[in-house]
Image (cartoon, grey):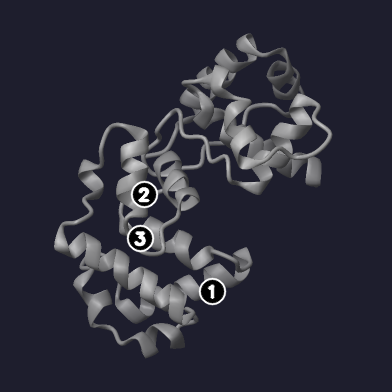
């Protein structure tokens, strides 16, 4: 499961004590709500399907995809469904390949969601070994489905933009700089990431 409300509150309080700029942002925006997803292949497949499409479109495609494969309790079924059927559910040819690759990795035992490495970087490496899973998707999974407390998705645009705002930078930092700027905030960067999305939405709205 992802970080609970208590984990987020503790993490943000710890960060606010370390950095006054975070304290100011927290006082303004308040604590974010938890973001918790189920552990397993379905959550990563939902991430794949949601890439580069709107939230509404992703939800529609996901519903049709789930109906086409008959659920996710047996991933063998996904491998048995023709690519043409997956495309008919709204997946691009590339995404159809990606979800099948993920199903194959799980079915073959190459990827075991119940036994990912405890080290975050090693866990990320295990996930990105699957075709179609990039670092961002791996980090999002580890944060929302496993609740790993120090995951920091520095490649996320909203995280970059909001970090730049909170730190008073002239523009959004690069992915590399986004990582460097919060090194002193280990091991609570997962709570900070969730706060960034929360604060970003408040600013945008």
> Eyeballing the image, is 143 above or below 168?
below
Judged left or right of residue 47, residue 23 is right
Q: Mark 2 points at which residue?
A: 38
Camera-side residue: 52 or 72?
A: 52
Q: How far apart are marks 1 and 2 (CA)?
A: 19 Å
> Eyeballing the image, is 196 above or below 52?
above
Disc 1 or 3, which lies upstream in sequence? 3
Q: Which mark is residue 115?
A: none
CB of mark 1 within 8 Å of CB of mark 3? no
Which quarter of the figure has residue 30? top right
CB of mark 3 within 8 Å of CB of mark 2? yes
Tell me what residue is drawn at x 60 percent, y 46 percent: 156
Disc 1 or 2, which lies upstream in sequence? 2
Q: In which quarter of the image is the N terminus?
A: top left
Q: Name the residue under label 3.
A: 42
| Numbered marks: total | 3
Circle 2 residues within 10 Å: few <14, some 14–19, many ≥20: some
Tell me what residue is drawn at x 62 percent, y 9 percent: 17
CB of mark 1 within 8 Å of CB of mark 2? no
Q: Mark 1 points at which residue?
A: 60
Q: Percent position (x, y) of residue 205?
A: 80, 47
């Amino acid at each position: 499961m992802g970080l609970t409300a208590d984990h987020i509150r503790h993490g943000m309080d710890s960060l606010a004590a370390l950095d006054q700029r975070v304290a100011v942002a927290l006082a303004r925006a308040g604590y974010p709500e938890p973001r918790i997803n189920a552990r397993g292949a379905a959550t990563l497949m939902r991430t794949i399907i949601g890439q580069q499409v709107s939230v509404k479109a992703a939800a529609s495609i996901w519903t049709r995809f789930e109906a086409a494969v008959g659920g996710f309790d047996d991933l063998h079924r996904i491998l048995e469904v023709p690519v043409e059927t997956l495309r008919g559910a709204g997946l691009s040819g590339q995404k159809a390949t990606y979800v099948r690759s993920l199903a194959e990795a799980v079915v073959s035992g190459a990827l075991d969601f119940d036994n990912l490495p405890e080290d975050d970087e090693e866990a990320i490496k295990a996930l990105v070994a699957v075709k179609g899973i990039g670092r961002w998707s791996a980090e999002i999974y580890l944060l929302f489905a496993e609740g790993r407390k120090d995951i920091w998705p520095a490649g996320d645009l909203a995280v970059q933009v909001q970090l730049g705002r909170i730190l008073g930078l002239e523009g959004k930092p690069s992915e590399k700089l986004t990582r460097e700027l919060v090194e002193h905030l280990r091991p609570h960067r997962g709570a900070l990431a969730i706060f960034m999305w929360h604060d970003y939405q408040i600013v945008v709205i």
